[in-house]
Amino acid sequence: MGMNSKLKDENTDYLFRCILELKSVDECYGFFEDLCTVSELKAMSQRTVVAKMLRDKHVYSDIVSHTGASTATISRVNRSLNYGSDGYELIFKRLDEAEKAEKSESVEQQ
């Protein structure tokens, strides 16, 4: 995984250690509501959904109508997906695996 040397410092390390302590979506809401402005949080969540939709091969027009993102934002996210640090891909793979595990658990319980 590429490490962005412009990004890496003690403060950012501390932020990420804090995030890694979060155990639930509710805990994330509490922390990120305190940490971020509404627009910062909306921007991050929008970029995450844009990345997922790009990965799932949606066209720009669908992404614009679903997320409200500008084509400039979509292009920037697309660049990160293709040439970034593989951060999105790592998370999406883990989410896919978690989803598959949940589905097989619910099938076993029936």
Image (cartoon, grey):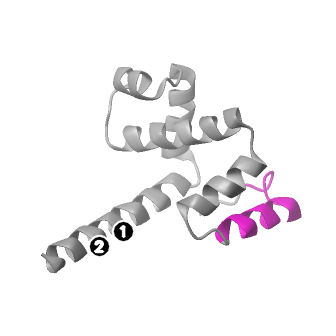
In the image, residue 85 lies at what x, y percent? 59, 54
Residue extending farthest left: 110
Give the residue type at disc 2.
Answer: Ala
- Confirm whether the magenta stretch covers residue 14: yes
Tell which of 76 and 43 is nearer to you.
Answer: 43
Query: Residue 34, position in %: x, y?
Result: 76, 50
Q: Is residue 110 above or below residue 18?
A: below
Quadrant location of the C terminus in the rendered image: bottom left
Q: Are marks 1 and 2 in contact (CB under 8 Å)?
A: yes
**Residue ID for mark 2:** 101
Residue 54: mark in rendering: none
Residue in the image at 52% along x and 25% along y: 69
User: What secondary structure is found at the residue carrying circle 2?
Assistant: helix
Magenta-highlighted residues:
4-20
Left or right: residue 33 versus residue 104 is right
Which residue type carries mark 1?
Ala
Question: Looking at the picture, how far across and down is residue 65, in whole percent?
Answer: 40, 21
Say which residue appears at 46% left-offset and 29% top-offset: 67
Q: Is 107 on the left-hand or right-hand side of 15?
A: left
> Which residue lies under the disc numbered 1?
98
Vertical comparison of 108 with 5: above or below: below
